Amino acid sequence: MIAPTTPALRPHEDVIRALEPEVERQLRTLRPIDTAWQPTDCLPDLVQEGWPERLAEFRDAARAVPDDLLVVLVGDMVTEEALPSYSTALNQLVGDAEGTSPAPWARWLRGWTAEENRHGDVLNAWLRLSGRVDMRAIERTVHALLAGGFNSRSGTDPYNLLVYTSFQERATRVAHAGVARRAEQAGERRLARICRAIAGEEARHERFYTAMMAHVLDVDPEGGVLAFAAMLERQIAMPGRAMTDGREPGLFDRFALVAERTGVYTAADYAAIVEHLVCAWRIGDRRLSGEAARAQDHLCALGARYGRLAERAAEAAARRPPVKFSWIFDRVA
Ligand SMILES: [Fe+2]
Ligand SMILES: [Fe+2]
């Protein structure tokens, strides 16, 4: 453990730089390329003889996925495909001016990006081969999301970015695991395997960011707690929230509604993630005073408060009528 110092005297960038030896140790969190799965491993082989039969079997199995789950899967895929925006945002934390820096944070960001890149790729390929969705409408959505840019509401504070990534990796893990569960129930075992593999990587990435933020809190409990409280105060921005298909407004809200109704990612999950992070970062045990102590009390009560709001959100979502999606040829979900 790194010894605590007088919090207000440590610029956040210095604390992040001082974590370099720990980041170096944690680089083993990333899988070596030789043992990493690739999208091709999860999809029908279109090169070997007999590929038309294998593709037909694949498409047959994909028919079992209900429309609401398909919509959630597309939203998850669009979110993954906007990876260039997240890598750009995270370079703020890493500060790799050249793009090939040998520094531990820079190597982490490149390795993380390379692993994440397969998530969008494999989901994109599954959706395309399934023949179940309007790929052009989906591609337009990805194009617009990337062109529009991404603001994590972290400002320029590296602590905020660590809070954000810890939250988001867990949120995406929950969402992919949720799709896997529902796909398994529907009998689409290949999709379930794919989403479980992605969820497993999100879990590994989550462990890294959560551990780094825990170190920040050990060194600078005041700054860390204030950053965590500030990020939750402005609500953790979902990475795909600006998505649009260029047709009907409120695409992300409609996607979030279906995610809530299918139970894949819900307001209750948001509350549970807050509660988990408060616990994982031992927020209640930190010795603090003044504004940070007030933020600490607020954070410790937040999970329960969000939990109560989540019950109302689930009831409201259940009452809403089905909504139309260009992604599934204007069918409703
Ligand atoms: Fe991902
Ligand atoms: Fe991720």
Image (spheres, rainbow, N blue to C red):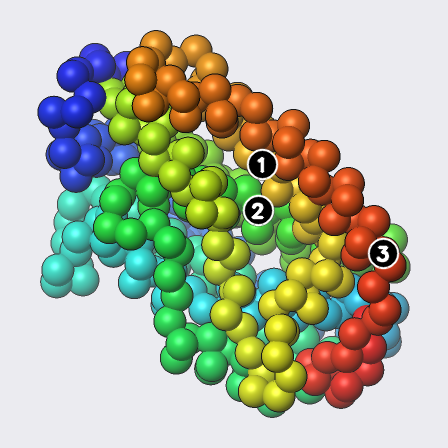
Residue underneath mark 2 = 171
For label 3, being within 8 Å of ligand 1 is answered no
Task: Locate residue 3: give its quadrant.
Answer: top left
Kindly identify the residue that appears in the image at 77 percent across and 86 percent down: 330
* 2 and 3 marks in contact (CB < 8 Å): no
Q: Position of residue 245 (x, y in %)?
A: 59, 83
Cα–Cα span, label 3 and label 1: 22 Å
Neighbour tally class for label 2: few under 14, some 14-19, many 20 plus, Cα within 10 Å: many
Residue underneath mark 3 = 318
Cα–Cα span, label 2 and label 3: 21 Å
Mark in front: 3 vs 1: 3
Q: Which of the two discs, 2 and 3, labels the residue nearer the N terminus?
A: 2
* 3 and 1 marks in contact (CB < 8 Å): no
Q: Quadrant of the N terminus?
A: top left
Going by the numbered disc 3, the residue's amino acid type is Ala
Residue underneath mark 1 = 273
* 2 and 1 marks in contact (CB < 8 Å): yes
